[in-house]
Image: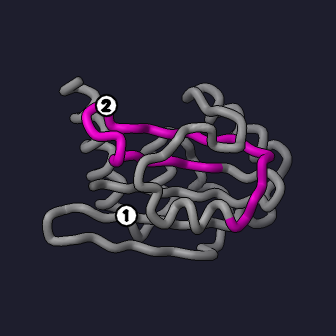
Amino acid sequence: MKNSRFIIILITIVILSCARRPDRAASAFGIEISDIAYTVLESFEQWAPNGDGEYYVSLALESISKESIERIKSDMRKKGAKELPVVEDLVAPGRMNTFYRKRGSDIGLYLIKIDDTDERNYSILIYDETTREMIIYIQIM
């Protein structure tokens, strides 16, 4: 239990320390996109003084080759990715529900890490094959 919480906190610190670099946020999940051209479509970050908050970024993966798509999908599967749609019942889904649900795609993969001690704390990386978007979302309560 403590190891899981430590890992979630460590991943969150890594991600937040590079919040301005979405490729680094993706690499915290073990997914490398630094060699792929992307454009930030949407970005939102809000943190309370007590550390609660959320981070969201949506990336358009431009001019991505078939080989790069397969590499991303392969890397995600190696890390335990699941097929969309997201099946977990996310507690206090915050902006993630608004941002992701409006797209409505069910073709792609996602990685999710939920804190064992507080299920409101989670991070998720989604690769949407239909729109070729990558979404990264972190919530800490």
Which residue is at 33% across, 44% downward?
Answer: 11
Q: Position of residue 58 (x, y in %)?
A: 59, 66
Which quadrant would residue 92 be assigned to in this image? bottom left
Q: Is residue 79 left or right of residue 10?
A: right
**Viewer-proximal residue among 94 and 107:** 94
Magenta stretch contains residue 122:
yes
Residue bounds of the magenta highlight = 102-126
> Circle 2 — which element?
loop
Residue 54, numbered circle: 1
Q: Is residue 71 left or right of residue 15?
A: right
Cα separation between marks 2 and 1: 18 Å
Q: Is residue 132 left or right of residue 81?
A: right
Magenta stretch contains residue 75:
no
Quadrant holding the N terminus:
top left
Which quadrant would residue 113 be assigned to in this image? top left
Q: Amino acid at mark 1?
A: Glu
Q: Position of residue 80 (x, y in %)?
A: 58, 27
N-terminal of the pair, mark 2 or mark 1, is: 1
Residue 116, numbered circle: 2
